[in-house]
Amino acid sequence: TPVTGVSLVAGGKDESWLDHSELSATLFTPFWSELLLTKVQNQFDLVIFDLGAGTNKFSLDFFTCAHLGIMTVLPEPTSIENAYSFLKATMGRLIDNVALNTGELSVAEKVKDLLFSYNQNEARQSYRDKLNQLYEEYPSFIEVFHSTLMARKIGFIVNQTRSQRDIEVGQSMKVICQNYFGFATCYLGHLNYDDSAWKALRNRKLLLSDFPHSVIVRKIAEVSHNIIHSLGY
């Protein structure tokens, strides 16, 4: 790109190989290896994946492989519900990955059944509490899973905020995610609703160059600083 030190690989369309489980399984591992090799050879400090919405297993794998998984949410009930559904799917995928590494596939299925089963008497019980209970029955598996859970961090960004109440959604999600799911979490900040964003899109220009003095550009800079700081840079 014209920006020194910034490279971009654009995805122009949905990857068809994701729809074929056998093919995708053979391509995913070498793709990941090439990615890590490229990072080292080109001395990139950061690699950012812009993942599509939904719970495709490869989106979940990329998300769980990241040192920091960033979730952007709108301050609306449907967006927040989708975020929690994604976190639940992420937890399930991590259990599958732990099972592959430990060889305890049958234990993983039992853990998922007990963890995600709905019982009216346990309606208010968090996944975190359930995991603590499951530790008594499957201590070695839960211990590895807990270490896997804590080795990753999830950050929240609230987009298109219009009020203080909207801004506070991110902090609430951080606390709930930490207490209910058990993930290590952080609140990375908010981006205000700004007409500059859709104007820049309509002009087919970068927001930063088209409206460099807008409030949202300043907020993007603040969020970016928080992301870099959370990664230890």
Image: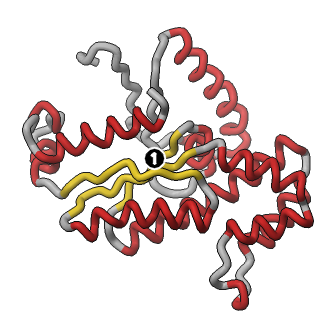
Q: Is residue 158 left or right of residue 232?
A: left
Q: Total label count?
A: 1
Is residue 179 or residue 64 the one in the foreground? 179
Q: Residue 36: x percent and y percent? A: 59, 21
Helix, strand or loop at mark 1: strand
Q: Which residue is mark 1?
A: 70
The residue most toward the bottom is 120
Q: Residue at x 66, y 57 (%)?
A: 91
Classify residue 40 by image quadrant. Answer: top right
Is residue 32 or residue 180 the one in the foreground? 180
Report the amino acid beneath label 1: Ile
Q: Is residue 49 above or below residue 157?
A: above
Q: Is residue 180 above or below residue 228?
A: below
Classify residue 92 by image quadrant. Answer: bottom right
Q: Residue at x 42, y 68 (%)?
A: 80
- State which quarter of the image contains the N terminus: top left
The residue most toward the top is 41
Q: Residue at x 75, y 71 (%)?
A: 130
